[in-house]
Amino acid sequence: ASGDLLGELAEPIGMSDYEVIRIAHEIGLRGLTGMSFICIPPGSAVIYRVIVYVITYLMAGLAMRKQNALKTG
């Protein structure tokens, strides 16, 4: 894929994009105090896009967590 600087076999048994994004949403639902992205390959459009989705779904999970807390508390 264009922008895949490490190649598809950099992590042969790695998680799919969907799994990473779904886990980010679940973490958001449970809450977190901080996060960090390390080792992002420069110029990798694929990774940049996944990170944007991870942040978006994480924030959606946090918003849902807060909304549920307001409803129950």
Image (cartoon, rainbow, N blue to C red):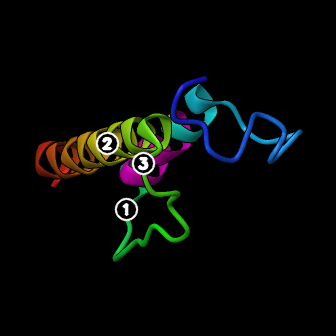
Labels 1, 3: front one? 3
Alpha carbon of mark 1 to alpha carbon of mark 2: how far?
Answer: 18 Å
Residue 22, x across and y down, in percent: 52, 34
Left or right of 14? Residue 53 is left
Q: Nearer the viewer, residue 46 or 66?
A: 46
Residue at the extreme bottom of the image, as rendered: 33
62 part of magenta stretch = no
Q: Which mark is residue 52?
A: 2
The kind of residue tagged 1 is: Gly
| Residue receiving disc 3 | 43
Q: Which element is circle 1 on?
A: loop
Q: Amino acid at mark 2?
A: Val
Quadrant placement of the C terminus: bottom left
Region rendered in magenta: 22-28
Residue mark closest to the camera, 1 vs 2: 2
Q: Are marks 1 and 2 in contact (CB under 8 Å)?
A: no
Secondary structure type for disc 2? helix
Q: Residue at x 76, y 33 (%)?
A: 8
Q: What residue do we see at 43% from left, 56% from top? A: 30
Number of other residues with Cα within 10 Å of mark 2, as a class: few under 14, some 14 to 19, many 20 or more: few
Residue under pointer 1: 31
Query: How many numbered marks does the figure carry?
Result: 3
- Disc 1 + disc 3, Cβ < 8 Å: no
- Where residue 13 sits: x, y (%)? 88, 39
- 62 shown above or below 15: below
Q: Assess disc 3: are there few (<14), some (14-19) or many (≥20) residues with their C-alpha within 10 Å of its C-alpha.
A: few
Predominant SS along the magenta part = helix
Amino acid residing under circle 3? Gly
The percent position of residue 37, horizontal first and vertical second, equals 45, 67
| 68 left or right, relative to 39 | left
